[in-house]
Amino acid sequence: MSRRPRICDYGDSSYRQDFWEGQGRDYEDAVERRLLRSLFQRRGGCRLLEIGAGFGRISGEYRAYEQVVLLDYSLEQLQYARRQLGDDGYLYVAADAYRMPFRPASFDAATMIRVLHHFEDVPAVLRQIRAVLADESRFILEYANKRNLKAMARHLLGRNGWDPYSLAPVEFVELNFNFHPDYMRQRLSESGFRLQRALPVSWFRLNVLKRALPTGMLAALDAALQHTGWELSPSIFLDLHTTGNGSQALIPAEDPLAIMRCPETGAALRRAEGGLVSDGGIRWAIQQGVYDFRQPLSKM
Ligand SMILES: C[S@@+](CC[C@H](N)C(=O)[O-])C[C@H]1O[C@@H](n2cnc3c(N)ncnc32)[C@H](O)[C@@H]1O
C-alpha cells in the first residue's frame, strides 16, 4: 500500500455510552474480561502495551504487569481512561498504531482487542507491533472472524454479499473489516509471531439468549467452547509469541522517555516546555498527562 492507510478515528465519540453502557453487551464484556483474566492471572511481566485501548474498558485486567501503556488515536478516550485509572502504573499515549512512537523492544507484552477490524493494512500494523516487542514476548490479538457460523448460514441462503470462505479481508462497512483465520495465520507468521493457541469467543451474541440466560452462565458456557479451538465464532483471540532467539532484550526504563521516540524520524526525545522535542527539533505535546504523537506542534 503506497498511500498512508486510513485511520478510524474515534475522537470524542460516545463509544462508551453508545456501544457499552446499558446497551445489552454485558455478556460480550464479561466473556472478554474472563478470558483476559485467565490468560494473565499467573503470568505477568514488566511492561504491556494495550493498542487501541479506547476509554480503558479492559485496561484494569493487565495488573499483572508493572506498567501498562495505553495507546489510542483518540486523545479524548485516553483522557477519560486516565481519569478512571490514574497514573500509578499507567502511561497514556495518543498515536497512530501504524507509526508507533516507541523504541524497538520496549515491551514484553501487547494486546489488541476489538481494534484490528479498523485496519486496512494488517501487515503494516503487525510489523510495527513486532518491532516494539522484545523477542519471546507475548501478544494477545483479537480479530473479527469472517468465517463464523452466522456468516456461513447467511452465505448458504445467499444473503451475505461476500464469501466467508475466501481469504481476503471483507470491508463490510467503511473501515470495518472481518478476517479469515487462515489469512490471519499467514500474516502473523510472516510478521514474526508464533501461534500458541486460538480461542474462539463470543458464541452467544444473540439477544434472545442474552435476555433469557444469566450473563455468568453464558460466559461460563462460552469459556468451555473456547477450549474446543473451533474457529467458527465471530471473535477470535490469539495467544501469540514473538519469534527470535532472545537476543533482543526488553529495554528497562525508569523514565518513560527511555522507551519513546519520535514517530516521524525515530530520533530520541527530551522534555521541553509544554511537551517533548526530538533531536531533529520536532515538538510534540503532552496534554493533560497524555503524550500526544498524532501531529507535531512544530518542526524546525
Ligand atoms: C472498538 S474500539 C475498542 C477499544 C478497546 N480496545 C475496547 O475493547 O474497549 C477501537 C479503538 O481503536 C482505536 N484505533 C483505531 N485505529 C487506530 C489507529 N490507527 N491507531 C491507534 N488507535 C486506533 C480507536 O480510536 C478506538 O478507540
Image (cartoon, helix red, strand yellow):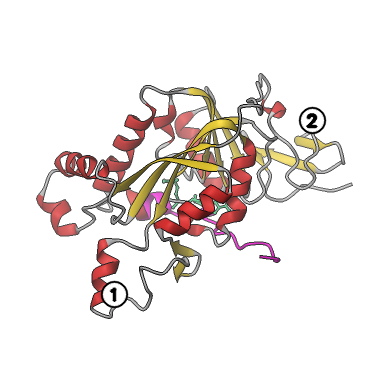
Residue 289 appears left or right of 18? right
Helix, strand, or loop for circle 1?
A: helix
* Image quadrant where residue 221 sits: top left
Quadrant placement of the N terminus: bottom right
Task: Residue at 44% x, 35% y: name it.
Answer: 59
Dominant secondary-structure state across the stretch colored magenta: loop
- Check residue 270 in the rendering and tell me which mark sits there, or answer none: 2
Q: From what the image shows, is residue 14 above or below residue 285?
A: below
Q: Would you name the residue on which mark 1 appears?
A: 155
Q: Residue furthest top?
A: 254
Magenta residues, start to end:
1-18
Residue 42 appears left or right of 129? left
* Image quadrant where residue 216 sits: top left
| Amino acid type, mark 2 | Arg
Helix, strand, or loop for circle 2?
A: strand
Residue 79 or 255: which is nearer the viewer?
255
User: Is there any visible trace of residue 60 in the rendered image?
Assistant: yes
How far across and how far down the image is residue 112, in percent?
48, 44
Q: CA distance from mark 1 to mark 2?
A: 55 Å
Q: From what the image shows, is residue 196 above or below residue 16?
A: above
| Amino acid type, mark 1 | His
Q: Verify CB contact (< 8 Å) between mark 1 and mark 2.
A: no
Residue 295 within the magenta-colored segment of the rendering: no
Residue 3 within the magenta-colored segment of the rendering: yes
